[in-house]
Amino acid sequence: MFTGASNLAEGVDKAFLFIFIIAFIFIIGISAFMIWTLIHFSRKKGKAPMQFSGSNKLELIWTVVPTILVLLMFWIGWKGFAPMRRVPPDAMKVTAIGRMWEWEFVYQDSMRSKELVLPINKPVKLDLVSEDINHSLFIPAFRVKEDVIPGYDNWLWFTPNYIGDYEILCTEYCGLLHSAMIAKTRIVEQEEFDKWLEDLKTASFIPDPQGLVLLRGTGCLACHSLDGAKLVGPSFKGFYGSQRNVSSGNTKKTVTADEAYIINAIYSPDEEIAEGYSKGLMQSYRGLLTESDINIITEYLRTLNVENQ
């Protein structure tokens, strides 16, 4: 009957099913009563209208019955909610980081992954961290959702019951690419998870380039992709050395994306606007990035695949 993919799904589904059934019964019952009333008590020619007085019995019924139903809804909802705040002591811990506009998952405090990979039938606790603004992590198949807010310690937990791939969404509007802030949960057997974690550990020994660390830390990757995808700003793939059509005031021109152009774009982003993009979307990073930082970023951009976009 219940098809949720975690141990918490059944309690959530029962609460929603109960509320839906009650609402359906009341919709049908009230609509039928209204139709019957209109027909039965309609004023007919030559017949005096019926007069009514109060009914204590009726008042009692429509006070007591809804109260009982609301209390039942609360009780069933509480039975589904309470286990969500009782984390098993042996739960595996993973940190889920939300940033504009992506999810990242950290294992054992240092190993990072863009997808959430977990072993089946093992409880996991996700510590929720935001690096910028409010987000909300939602895994529909597991029936779990919690806010991810800067400076606020929040978490969720569940035990996955079925092998497969499941969507992770952001349900707190967090900007232009809110709808694209998606990731994947992959549930696998324990042996496959152990191998994946070992491979992730090996890959984690290779540190990220310092330029990439700077881009990530300053939020640049929220608006500029590394794979050619068009976001709020131009992609960094193939950016360095490419020819850019820009608007400067009322003048349109073509410039080369070299060191001077990059420095100007970071310190005075509205001075030269790339074709196809809008003014006022990027703040100045003057005082936030030094020229030494920009040189490191520029060197990193050189290493990316250079091809005109």
Image (cartoon, rainbow, N blue to C red):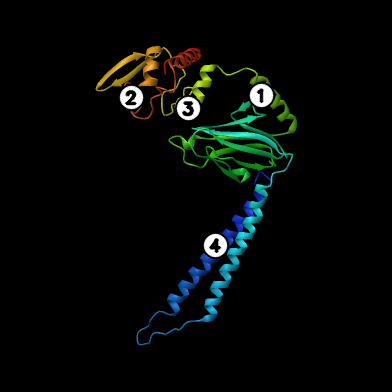
Q: Which residue is mark 3?
A: 219
- Circle 2 sits in a helix, a strand or a loop, which is it? loop
Foreground: 177 or 207? 207
In the shown orientation, is residue 267 left or right of residue 136? left
Q: Is residue 269 left or right of residue 63?
A: left
- The kind of residue on which mark 1 rests is Leu
Who's the residue at 41% across and 26% down the image? 233
Label 4 Cα crowd, 10 Å radius (few <14 / some 14-19 / many 20+): few
Give above or below for 16 relative to 230.
Answer: below
Mark 3 / mark 1, whichever is N-terminal: 1
Q: Image height check: is 113 above or below 3?
A: above
Q: Residues within 10 Å of mark 1 (few under 14, many from 20)?
A: some
> How many angstroms separate mark 1 from mark 4 (CA)?
49 Å
**Tag 2 or tag 4, which sits nearer the N-term?**
4
Residue 58, image x, y percentages: 53, 78
- Mark 1 = which residue? 200
Task: Name the front one of labels 1 and 4.
Answer: 1
Front position among marks 4 and 2 = 2
Task: Residue 69: tell me if it is visible.
Answer: yes
Q: Amino acid at mark 2?
A: Asp
Residue at x 65% of width, y 53% of height: 80
| Residue at (33% x, 24% y) in the render | 270
Q: Amino acid at mark 3?
A: Gly
Q: Which residue is mark 2?
A: 270
Q: Residue furthest left?
A: 250
Spatial CA distance of label 2 from label 1 is: 40 Å
First-in-chain label (2 vs 3): 3
